[in-house]
Image (cartoon, rainbow, N blue to C red):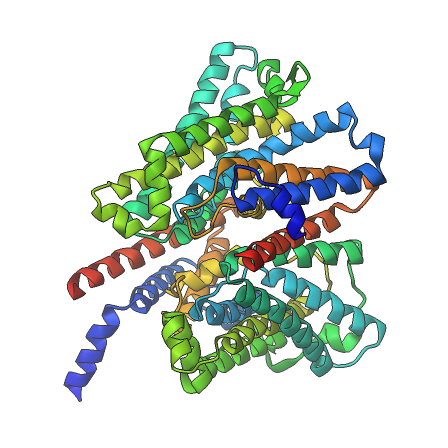
Amino acid sequence: MEQVLNSLKLPTDKNIRYLLVILVGILAVMAFSSGQAFFSIDNLQSMSSQMPLLGLLALAMAVCMLTGGINLSIIATTNACGLVMASIITQAPDSSAMLVLALFGGLITATVIGLLNGALIAYVGVSPILATLGTMTLINGLNVLISGGSVISGFPEALLVLGNGSIFGVPMPLILFAGFAIGLWALLEHTSLGRTIYLMGSNEKATRFSGINTQKATLYVYVISSVLCWVAAIVMMAKFNSAKAGYGESYLLTAILASVLGGINPDGGFGRIIGIGLALIVLQTLESGFNLLGVSSYLTMALWGGILILFIFLQKNKA
Amino acid sequence: MLNQFRCSLSSFTKRHEFYLSLMIVLIVAVLTFTSEDFLTLGNIFDMSVSSALLGIMACGLFVVLIAGGIDISFPATAAIAQYITATYIVMIGGNFMIAFAIAIVVGVLLGMINATLVYKLKVPAIIITISTLNVFFGLLIYFSNGEWLYGFPDWFMDGIELFTFTGSDGYDYGLSLPILTLVGMIAVTSFLMSKTRLGRQIYAVGGNADAASRIGINLFGINLFVYGYMGALAGIASVVQTQITQSVAPNSLMGFELTVLAAVVLGGTSMTGGKGTLFGVVLGVILLAVAKNGLTLLGVPSYWHTVVTGLIIVCSISMTAINEKKQALQEA
């Protein structure tokens, strides 16, 4: 094991090496057990169109976790954006002006929710887990109240293509995810706001005393998180061709799991976007592979949890 | 004497519990005037039964939070305990003592797995328990195939009923198993946290784990205890829930973790450990139960319930945070 790890001298940190080792292990198992079926174009395409939704939500979670916070309201926000956009679009499904208006409406919804979360945390001083637990309950309630718990469906082709279309065989959701992941990476590693986010995660007080307006930065972070939820909402609407309160609730804990597996330190300060990308590939390979082998999806869920614990165990033993 | 009373009263008004009590009194007063069904014994018993599950689990989570930990996996723990207990009762029989004993043993074992992982891996407890939630729940559904269990023996279906009386609406009410268990668990937790050395140690660990460890408190032991206690209460709550619903669905408790967490933090328990009272937790549970019951009695559509719960949580945690900020400023 030691030698295997040493031979993997990549210019990256330990987390990413472990993830690569786990990924190679899974791929080897898949190659032996299902071979052709797993590596077929069809399977790769379906895998890469399933992953982005969880991926976007994981990014939304991760950006908050980097500051030492957490955002439990991501699913509620996603559904809220979805419902707002859906109810605007279905007023006039064929008008492209309406589509733009709907997207804009969703973006405003996301921004308002992000500002609410950020204000509660930065200015009122509520701890992030409590603030977002509260807003999660509140938004979930509003979602059900406004939609009456019913499904809104019937979207124009221009929107559906974002969920099901592809360019040169690459599914649209993957392109969207890649775009926003790269954008977030650039923001985190090449702007002063990104520096501030990492600094706040390491030591919030020291950051504040060094003259950085941490309250404003917190506000930005939660707005960014909400905006990523808005993108997730677009992908979700396009994939399901519908919007409803309560969609995708199981993604909440999975998004945390993917972020931590990707090397995001839940106490804040450490973690990179590339790690999340790898973690998502690991999770998706496991799910699709097991699906091909006919293993129950609940067993996969158990294995996801198991892999995270194993991963943490490996990290701790080496450190 | 009077001075002392005034002094303790003025310190009470500064506390979180005071505002909670005030809010509850206000809601109860409004409901008593607007709905004649609200302040009847029958309705109060109904409320207690329907919040028994929440109350029992909140007691367990309270202890974990005081020790500075958190447990998200307890609904899965409860579901597993429930499934094993129910299978035993349907197949073999037994009595309530045996049912509770099985559920508690299963709960404690699963809780101790959490404790060991949290302590040995030194990772935030929320991450570990999210993982174990996935593992426990996934395995339960896999091995049970998601099948429901019903057809319990009569002694289980009938439950326990003390001091029965017939309410004004013609139904029989009494101290049933859920109410007895709820009251019992609140009493046990209260005794544990305020009258025993172990309780003080739990507060100490939550306040400052390093300091507690240096004065000779066994941190691993405390961890094992609090997560075990949470597991035990989850097990007990699961038996109560089985008795109320008279059936077992492996996924019926899913998503309950955040509701319980909301009730506990509503009661003023700090997420960072060491601070909080069981009285506050009970008030938090009462507030949620009264609000829900009141909305139902007033004929408000159920769509509104979550909105109101959310508003209550957001307002209450904001008030606590503002209060704490003020106190910190005064002390500084």
User: Residue at (72%, 47%) from the top-left corner?
Assistant: A300
User: Residue at (55%, 23%) from the top-left corner?
Assistant: A176
Image-quadrant location for residue B326: bottom left
Q: In the rendered view of the protein, which quadrant contains the C terminus of chain B?
A: bottom left
User: Residue at (44%, 81%) from the top-left corner?
Assistant: B217
Q: Is residue A201 above or below residue B238?
A: above
Q: Is residue A77 above or below residue B147?
A: above
Which x, y percent locates residue A221? 37, 38
Image-quadrant location for residue B241: bottom right
Which x, y percent locates residue A40? 79, 26
Relative horizontal placement of residue A236, taking residue A107 as reference (left or right): right
User: Residue at (43%, 70%) from the top-left corner?
Assistant: B66
Q: Is residue A94 above or below residue B112?
A: above
**Which of the pair A51/B36 is nearer the observer?**
A51
Can residue B240 be seen at all in this image of the molecule? yes
Relative horizontal placement of residue B271, taking residue B80 as reference (left or right): left
Image-quadrant location for residue A107: top left
Q: Is residue B171 above or below residue A107?
A: below
Can residue A148 be seen at all in this image of the molecule? no
**Which of the pair B253/A264 is nearer the observer?**
A264
Relative horizontal placement of residue A7, taking residue B332 as reference (left or right): right
